[in-house]
Amino acid sequence: MRYLALAIDFDGTLAQDGHVRPETVAALDELKPTRRLVLVTGRRIPELESAFPELSLFDRVVAENGAVTFNPATGVVRALAAPPPDMLLERLRAANVPFETGHAIVALWAPHETDAFTAIAELGLEYWVSFNKGAVMLLPAGHTKATGLESALHELGLSPLNAVAMGDAENDHSMLVSCGLGIAVANAVPALRLSADVTLTAGHGEGVEEVAYGLIRDDLRGLDANSNRRLRLGISDGEPVYVSNSEAVVLVIGASGAGKSSYALGILNALVSAGYQAVVVDPEGDYCDEKPGVAIVGSAVWPPTVESLQPFIHEPRGSVVACLVGAGQAHRRAFLTGLLHYAGEQREATGRPHWLMIDEAHQLLYDAQDLRTSLERWPLGNALIVTVYPEALAPAVLQQVTHVVALSDASPEVDRLAVMLGVPSPVSESETTHRALLWAVGEPTTTSLDISGICLPHTRHARKYAEGDLGPGGSFYFHQAGTDRVTRARNILDFATRLQTIDEATWRFHQDRGDFARWLRECIRDETLAEIAEAAAAVPDFRSGQSKLREGILARYCSRPDAELSR
């Protein structure tokens, strides 16, 4: 299931004129065994309990327009905002404004919002004023129905992106926009109907009943297609091209160096920025630079385990990169099948992780019984699969692919994929002015796709080159001038460390032969660093040349350019 929670406004949505239909209560009671229910309201807890005694129907109540959460099962009330300052209350009394207070809210009615605005401005308070038709609510800045709902869902281990929100009034905007699907009932104010993903033809409780039974029937698959929560894959003919965030498996293919990882990094950045949880399986270290909101687990000397990822996945916004640079092939495969099992169980319980991203997929998703068994029980769900060799992927993987993004000159691969899938090859459009083709599997044509606005710059296989063992054929060998001594640098940071210890004769020996630049260009595949090495060779003072090259390495392969290297 994608939607694990239903968040409902009270006045005007669940209730009409303060009354809730028995049919609506029955529908929610039928939904409760499979979904978490959250009531979200501007009311205070005592008046809500008086108006609707069946609060035990809900797992959480968000009251006072997002400033308070309440657990009906335990009776625990948690204030998320500070009480209103006395000077504000005194100013309202002096202006003869009738109001009521809760833990944090100041509630009044139109037309006294003008008095409230004046008091807030003159006192210099950082307060927000929210409306629910005739009701006016004052709260400290930053507190809305969306923030209160996120706090309540966090207590339940859920993300707002796995919730459906329903409302009718001005103060419901933030809640509907923050959730995976925002629904306005038919009686909603015009602005809310415009911003909602879906507007129902039924109002009040009848609309709630429609949504409740739709969740029970098919997880709202019919309405879900209207969600604004979609992943942008690129631009075609000036218009964004999206894919649903529901069970989309996107295969990214192209030659080595075509920009697959740059594209995938851009997708990861977009997902994290939108609040989605992504788990990245990274065999070569392409995603291991520090990013806000993304943890990195594993290194060249410490392969990650599925257990080491779990604390991050338990957090609704916790995205994580599993760096497999230091893992052998057997560990990588066992890690992947274990991750598919764990992610499948978590998705059933919480709807997360929202996306799996698997780079260098041909190294991990090749055909074997262990993978077939895992995929039969735990489908990939939302996944981005990146590979230079799509033909090496297991048939069980290819059968789940819904979209193919072919970079550069990879259109022949699309034809081969069509043959492997047993569907007609699509007619390919010209790629002369675009960087990619998009094929929705089974469609008769491809679409030209401009992905320049998505790709992010990165250093290819940075962690592998920086910390991994490049093997005998990929290492650099320092030959000490005038001796038979040879020292091996197993990666780029090891190279930078050993570079500091060589004498001038050894430096000149390698620079005169162009060894440094050649190794950086051909083995590390870093043209920029190769050019720095060539420039360093021209520096008269060899220590200055060494420093120039070392600083270039640190700037490109260390998160802190001033870091000291030691091995």
Image (spheres, helix red, strand yellow):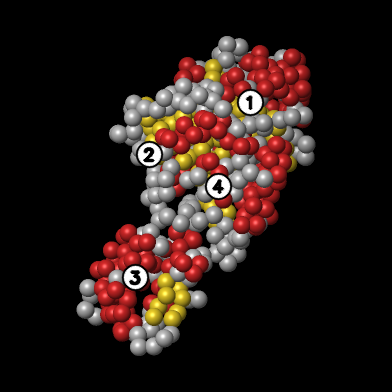
Identified by mark 2, the residue type is: Asp
Counting from the top left corner in percent of width and height, residue 13 is at: 62, 19
Callout 2: helix, strand or loop? Answer: loop
The residue mark sitting in front, 2 or 3, is 2
Q: How many marks?
A: 4
Confirm or deny contact between disc 1 and disc 4 (CB under 8 A): no
**Other-residue count near label 2 (Cα within 10 Å), few / some / many at <14 / 14–19 / ≥20:** some
Specify which label sits upstream in the sequence, 2 or 3: 2
**Other-residue count near label 3 (Cα within 10 Å), few / some / many at <14 / 14–19 / ≥20:** many
Is 39 placed above or below 504 here? above
Residue at 61% x, 22% y: name it: 221
Q: Quadrant of residue 447?
A: top left
Counting from the top left corner in percent of width and height, residue 491 is at: 46, 68
Specify which label sits upstream in the sequence, 4 or 2: 4
Q: Which residue has dot 3 on it?
A: 516
Identified by mark 4, the residue type is: His
Q: Quadrant of residue 410?
A: top left
Q: CA distance from mark 1 to mark 4?
A: 45 Å
**Other-residue count near label 1 (Cα within 10 Å), few / some / many at <14 / 14–19 / ≥20:** many
Callout 3: helix, strand or loop? Answer: helix
Q: CA distance from mark 2 to mark 3?
A: 32 Å
Identified by mark 3, the residue type is: Phe
Q: Which mark is residue 8?
A: 1
Callout 1: helix, strand or loop? Answer: strand
Q: Which residue has dot 2 on it?
A: 409
Is 556 placed above or below 69 here? below
Q: CA distance from mark 2 to mark 1?
A: 50 Å
Confirm or deny contact between disc 1 and disc 3 (CB under 8 A): no
Residue at 41% x, 34% y: name it: 411
